[in-house]
Image: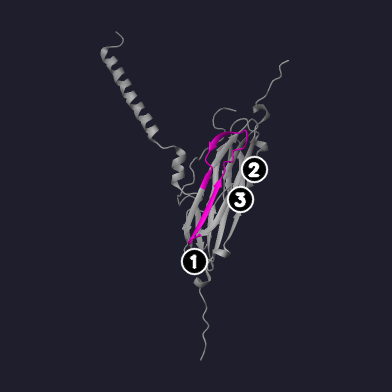
């Protein structure tokens, strides 16, 4: 794997308050070790079953659908209950068939395992 | 002669201009506050939506990643106070490639829109949303007055 950022957001803008926009990009952390790349996104208000992850050749799209806003009169409105959508470019050397995801407490963790050929290997010297 | 004096002067002029531009770039860079600080000042954390129903006030805060022990909810002099901390969740042995979810320690004091029955306040945490329900104080609820026929 190269030294560049392992997973790059292709729509990097963070949550904006554009009322014409139907979705917002969730904030994301990306971690990497020798075995895998971890992508952690904040998707508050979305249960696991409403999170969709699609892998299409070298892109990964995370979509978390949020339930419609409450109908009660609003006393304060600091966040919009819009769905979260963000697309990432999958770096080379990822075993795309074995990407797994897990939702917990309003965050989703996507595990992108590295293909065997991309893992660092130790060669025994005889 | 390949390079005339005129060309030579131009070269120094260009170098001088380049140096001044570099100085300006470096100056701007030093003057700019670090990214993290800008983001913290920009918006409070957590973000809160509030609604009013007939019987209660409902406050909902976006607290992704927080567990039960990470947040405390209190009602203090006509205000709802949320205190807590979202700890760093960098897994052991991993390198950071992108960091948009920094750890945060927070205190948010939200003025209440009316009197509440502070003994009956409930709070629940689900899918990263903290929902606090504050029943309105009994004396502020609308009362039906029986009409007696004389």
Q: Looking at the picture, does residue B2 appear above or below residue A123?
A: above
Confirm whether circles 2 and 1 share one chain: no
Provide the chain ID for the residue under circle 2. A
Q: In which image quadrant can residue B55 be found?
A: bottom right
Provide the chain ID for the residue under circle 3. B
Residue sticking out furthest to the left: B6
The location of residue B73, given as percent across then percent down, is 55, 56
Instruction: Answer whether labels 2 and 1 touch (C-beta < 8 Å).
Output: no
In 3D space, how far apart are the residues under numbered discs 1 and 3 (Cα atoms)?
27 Å
Element on which disc 3 rests? helix
In 3D space, how far apart are the residues under numbered discs 2 and 1 (Cα atoms)?
44 Å
Q: Which of marks 1 and 3 is nearer the N terminus?
A: 3
Confirm whether circles 1 and 3 share one chain: yes
Crowding near the residue tagged with mark 2, few <14, some 14–19, many ≥20 C-alpha atoms within 10 Å: some
Residue sitting nearer the eye, B133 or A82: B133
* Residue B85 painted magenta: yes
Can you tell which of label 2 and label 1 is closer to the viewer? 1
Q: Looking at the picture, does residue B111 appear above or below residue A119?
A: below
Residue A101's disc is 2
In this image, A44 relative to B79: left or right?
right
Crowding near the residue tagged with mark 1, few <14, some 14–19, many ≥20 C-alpha atoms within 10 Å: some
Determine which residue is flagged by label 3: B69
User: What range is drawn magenta here?
Assistant: B76-105
* Residue B106 painted magenta: no
Residue sticking out furthest to the top: B1
The location of residue A111, given as percent across then percent down, is 64, 38
Which residue is at a point 46% across and 43% down the rendered structure image? B39
In 3D space, how far apart are the residues under numbered discs 3 and 2 (Cα atoms)?
25 Å
Determine which residue is flagged by label 1: B115
The location of residue A89, given as percent across then percent down, is 56, 36
């Amino acid at each position: 794997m190269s030294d560049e950022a392992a997973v790059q957001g292709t729509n990097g803008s963070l949550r904006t308050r554009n009322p014409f926009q139907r979705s917002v990009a969730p904030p994301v952390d990306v971690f990497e070790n020798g075995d895998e790349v971890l992508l952690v996104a904040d998707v508050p208000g979305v249960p696991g079953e409403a999170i969709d992850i699609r892998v299409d050749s070298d892109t990964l799209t995370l979509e978390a659908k949020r339930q419609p806003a409450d109908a009660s009169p609003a006393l304060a409105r600091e966040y919009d209950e819009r769905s979260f959508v963000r697309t990432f470019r999958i770096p080379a050397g990822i075993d795309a068939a074995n990407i797994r995801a897990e939702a917990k407490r309003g965050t989703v963790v996507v595990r992108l395992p590295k293909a065997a050929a991309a893992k660092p290997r130790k060669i025994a010297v005889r | 002669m390949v390079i005339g004096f005129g060309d030579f002067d131009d070269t120094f002029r260009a170098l001088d201009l380049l140096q001044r531009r570099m100085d300006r770039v470096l100056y701007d860079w030093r003057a700019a506050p670090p990214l993290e600080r800008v983001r913290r000042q920009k918006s409070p954390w957590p973000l809160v939506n509030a609604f009013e129903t007939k019987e209660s006030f409902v406050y909902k805060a976006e607290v992704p990643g927080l567990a039960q022990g990470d947040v405390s909810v209190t009602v203090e002099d006509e205000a709802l106070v949320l205190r807590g901390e979202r700890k760093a969740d960098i897994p052991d042995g991993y390198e950071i490639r992108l960091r948009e979810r920094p750890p945060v320690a927070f205190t948010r004091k939200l003025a209440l829109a009316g009197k509440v029955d502070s003994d009956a306040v409930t709070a629940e945490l689900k899918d990263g949303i903290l929902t606090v329900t504050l029943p309105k104080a009994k004396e502020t609820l609308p009362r039906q007055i029986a009409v007696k026929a004389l």
